[in-house]
Amino acid sequence: MNIRSLTRSDGAVIGAAVLLFIASFLAFFQAEDKDCTGTCSFNTWDPALFPLLPTVTIAGLAAAALLALGHMLPGERKILGLGLDQWGTALAVFVGWSALWSSFSNLFPDLNSEFGDSNEGVELGVGAWLTLIGGLVMAIFAVLGNSVPALKGPLLPAPSPKAPNPYGPGPQPGHPQPGGYGYPGGPQPGQPQTGGYGYPGGPQPGHPQPGGPQPSQPQPYGGQPTPAAGPGAPADPNFQPFWFAVPVARPLFPEDGSPNPIAELAPGTWYLAVEQRGQALVAQTQDGRRGILQDTSGIQRG
């Protein structure tokens, strides 16, 4: 379960659910100067307002839970063929519709026995207005959260860990590496290197060494061949996961090397890099899917 997978629309829906729960304890209907058999105000928990409690308050809490779990749980969880976020969106719309119609007192005939022969003089309390606002906000953000890019962004900011070298260990400016040229344990300036190219015991210009790198094929630092990118490339054992964002939309390919993308990484969204294979990254989306990002140029590290 990844809490950083929650979106901004999820945050608005959760806030609306909290508002509905608070409003359920406040006066929904109230009357002044009326001869009541008991109290002259009722909240959502009173039996006279049934079924307001299950159709608005409890349904709103369930909608927020389904939407949050649909984004935090890895993989795609389905109930009767629909994902958890789809059930949550449908339930949120139902909550908004129920909250809208609950504002009419004639939907609760049991109030007649409490307020007399008619509901004349009965007014909506603060709980009714907060219920209406919370239900409409929940329905609007649940629907727009799937289509508005600004609402699909992450709710929590990405962490800011110390950025490791994304291309594996290598010489850093001001950080000597043992065994490197000019550093302790490595060849010093002015000292010939035995077995190296152009030095005694090594291949001479125009005479490439069998099985070794050719002069026309430059090698990276340390003389090791650049690892290939893709599913067959070895993973970097020194890699540390980090959050990143792409500058433009880029496809995410399966780890088995299939050519068909499994997802598209969108700019403005943070993704988790869990592994490095050559120049490519194994990225994890907010819904738990993993794939290979082959084009890592210009990515923004968190």
Image (cartoon, rainbow, N blue to C red):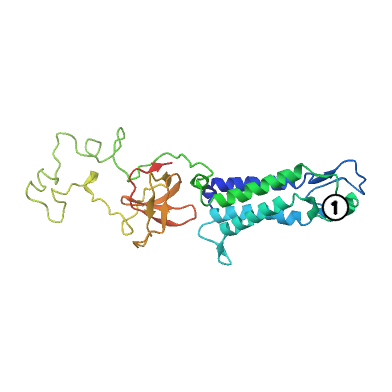
Tell which of 52 and 246 is nearer to you. Answer: 52
x 59%, y 46%: residue: 11
**Residue 219: percent from the left, percent from the top?**
20, 47
Can residue 251 be seen in the rendering of this structure?
yes
Q: Is disc 1 placed on a helix, strand or loop?
A: helix
Tell which of 271 and 144 is nearer to you. Answer: 144
**Residue 67: percent from the left, percent from the top?**
59, 54
Total marks in image: 1
Can residue 17 be seen in the rendering of this structure?
no
Residue placed furthest toward the bottom: 80
Instruction: Using the rendered view, name the quadrant where residue 52 is placed.
Output: bottom right
156 vs 209: above or below: above
Tell which of 65 and 196 is nearer to you. Answer: 65
**Residue 206: percent from the left, percent from the top?**
6, 48
Instruction: Using the rendered view, name the quadrant where residue 162 is placed.
Output: top left
Q: Is residue 35 left or right of residue 187?
A: right
Q: Is residue 107 left or right of residue 65?
A: right
x 58%, y 48%: residue: 141
Mark 1, residues whose alpha carbon is within 10 Å: few (<14), some, or many (≥20)? many
Instruction: Using the rendered view, name the quadrant where residue 19 is placed.
Output: top right
Q: Which residue is mark 1?
A: 111
x 46%, y 53%: residue: 285
Q: Quadrant of the C terminus?
A: top left
**Residue 5: percent from the left, percent from the top?**
52, 50
Q: Is residue 136 left or right of residue 81?
A: right
Q: Amino acid at mark 1?
A: Leu
Residue placed furthest toward the top: 174
Tell which of 83 and 156 is nearer to you. Answer: 83
